[in-house]
Image: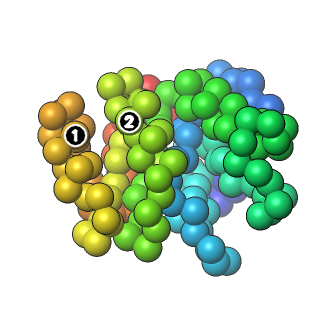
Amino acid sequence: MSSSQPQNRIVFAPQPYESQGEKAVFLSGSIDKGPITWQARLSDALSSLPITILNPHRSDWDSTWVEDISDSRFYEQVMWEQNMMEAAEVIAIYFSPDSQAPITLLEFGLFARSGKVVVACPEGYWKRGNLQVVCQRLGIELLWSLEELHKAIEKKLGPAGKV
């Protein structure tokens, strides 16, 4: 296989995921609005690794969905995210300064003690101070950029994408 071809596979919500022996990285973080998201940039940066990237982005999401357990589409999305974070070996969390990302804070809180999280929070994020304190308390390195997050994921995965 050519080195220019991606070695990773990307599973988007709500597609099913079953490990084929490779490690998985879940992308938790701010939702960008634009043609090139942080998730796409990070997936591209990790393309040389034989891993699965679990991306919660949904192209069919729209504002008519009610954020309530009674909306089956919403429920399916939240359950997919929770199940994929549990299945992943690494949970990569990115807090963009351009977004409040309350669900990302929730996901961080749920999995901070799991030993699976790597966290990047550039200067300017509205709750950076809270993240600094929690990360320090739990011994989690708080990174400054998407580039540092990429390197930390590779380090956590180890050689050839193995945890």
Residue 40 image offset from top left, x and y in percent: 61, 63
Name above or below for residue 71 compared with residue 88. below
Residue 83 image offset from top left, x and y in percent: 64, 27
Q: How is the image coloured?
A: rainbow
Q: CA distance from mark 2 to mark 1?
A: 9 Å
Q: Amino acid at mark 1?
A: Val
Query: Counting other residues with Cα less than 10 Å from the Cα at mark 1, is it few (<14), some (14-19), or many (20 or more)?
Result: some
- Reading the image, the residue beneath label 1 is 134
Tell how many labels. 2
Give the residue at the far bottom of this rendering: 34
Q: Residue at x 69, y 31 (%)?
A: 79
Please give left or right for residue 14 compared with residue 23 in the image: right
Please give left or right for residue 117 compared with residue 140 in the image: right
Depth check, front residue: 102 or 120: 102
Q: Splitting the image into 4 quarters, where does residue 57 fall? A: bottom right
Name above or below for residue 23 compared with residue 77. above
